Image (cartoon, rainbow, N blue to C red):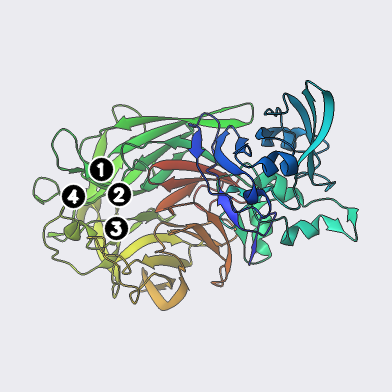
Amino acid sequence: MQTFSLLLASAIAVTGSAAGATARMTNFPIRMNGFSDFCSANSLDQKDNVLQVSGDCSPDPNGARNMGAALFTSHININECLHNNKGHLVPQQHGGALGSCDCDVGFSLCDTCNGTSLKCACNDNTGKKQVTFMDMNQFLGIGLDDDGRIVLYCEGVYGEWNQCVKNGAATKCPPKIAAMAVDASAFSIHEEPAKALFGETPTLELLHENEQYPFAHEAGVFIAADDTLFITSNQYPDPATGRKKIQISRVKLNRSGGKTTAEVEEINPDGVPMANGGVNYRGGVLFCAQGGLDASAEPGGLVHMEPRPPYASRALVESFHGRQFNSVNDVVVHSDGSIWFTDPIYGYEQGIRPKPVLPCQVYRFDPNGGVGGKGSVRVLADGFGRPNGICFSPDELTVYVTDTDWIHGDGTTDLTRASTIYAFDVANYSGQPFLTHRRLFAMADTGIPDGIKCDVYGNVYSGTGDGISVWSAGGVLLGKILVDGGAANFCFGREGEVFILNEHKLWRAQLAPSTKGALLRI
């Protein structure tokens, strides 16, 4: 496995921030060889990719003598590094006991690997002095940890730094490192094909954060005509009633100057009780309605919603020949118009649905079947612990279904249960489709494989406990988009963009423009 990281050493993580995000202050312990003998670091702040480090060397007289100053403050602008042809990380200001300083960092992240000393010209009452605040080789490095977060490395610059310096001569640094430096999460490469899928400079940006409730959990339906995204929240207590609630949100994407921002609007369409998964359908959104405790008043099933106000909705199917579904979870639409969906028992376990009266199964609904074309529903697959995500391969000859029996609705987990993706062949017998040749396709190594999608090349993507995992059509793990906290679901947008639902956060990953989702193919 290859990860995009610059240095190998003990690291202190810095929370990444996207444009417009709130700055975060992180106090961190110092474990620097030599530096910690004399000085202590106070805080680290990051805003718009500017790192600020403060250190106090005054308690020990050796601090000023060995470190060159009694107090230092460094503002290191990573944006400047990314847009500077020379690729230097340049502190904008330094100050302390020696007075004001103009500093230059020979530590290069973006282009060439020159010297690694932080040297400053400082003015005090005796005149200008050249001071070396620290040698990066001994004390400080800036790069990415294995989770792709911007970090300070505090026990020496070792390991992969050597990829920039060969035989004592400066060489070009890999361009991906510079691009990844502004990301809050890494793109992890397990196999060579992932490099082409992710592209030369993949990025990950935070579009929106809501600390009040987990607004970004499921669905993820991109409406290209309006450049909007529809998402559903995880369950949370309604402040007004105290009852469990799921909120549907419309996300309007604004694109200008190469940047994407998001406006999130809560919407409350009628007739979609406890919405979960969703998919594009007839110009709008087809939601999985899990239903409520009163099955007669709030039946579960599939509900089509118009994408514009007043968000009119219409139920397509609400039962299996009169027997209530458990809690419909995820859905996909075949090119012939049929609708395929999963129905686990999570709703009952979470206290939002009555006791199940059906096994955990995969269904197919034909909206044109039945008497008078009112629709017909049949079971296609059983034998799951908790069937969850579902999708087709690009040629629609394979169906992928995730089984998330590893986690139950009450939050308990059983590591011996399925955290698995199964593949089925779609075969026709007597003019009707059947799922045949069930086989284990892949297992998530972290958490569960929840939402699942394919790209136009047949690769399989699934939201897991550490982000999004990508497998080849042969079941080989190609790479990951690592997101702290994982992702229940996601969807493709335009030309390689992926919208990642991370509970309290909505992310936008930009992959290679040719990496397009098999559903919309845009």
Q: Is disc 3 surrounded by few (<14), some (14 to 19) or many (20+) residues within 10 Å?
A: many
Q: Is disc 4 surrounded by few (<14), some (14 to 19) or many (20+) residues within 10 Å?
A: many
Q: Nearer the viewer, mark 2 or mark 1?
A: 1
Residue 365 circle label = 3
Identity of the residue drawn at 80% across and 35% down = 131
Q: Is disc 1 surrounded by few (<14), some (14 to 19) or many (20+) residues within 10 Å?
A: many
Residue 276 circle label = 2
Quarter-wise, where is residue 384 in the image?
A: bottom left
Towards the viewer: 362 or 34: 34
Mark 3 or mark 1: which comes first in sequence? 1
Q: Are marks 1 and 4 in contact (CB under 8 Å)?
A: no
Q: What's the amino acid at mark 3?
A: Phe
Q: State the residue position of label 1.
A: 246
In three-dimensional space, the C-alpha distance between marks 2 and 4, rounded to whole angstroms, equals: 10 Å
Towards the viewer: 33 or 198: 33
Q: How many marks?
A: 4
Q: What's the amino acid at mark 2?
A: Asn
Q: State the residue position of label 4.
A: 291
Mark 4 or mark 3: which comes first in sequence? 4
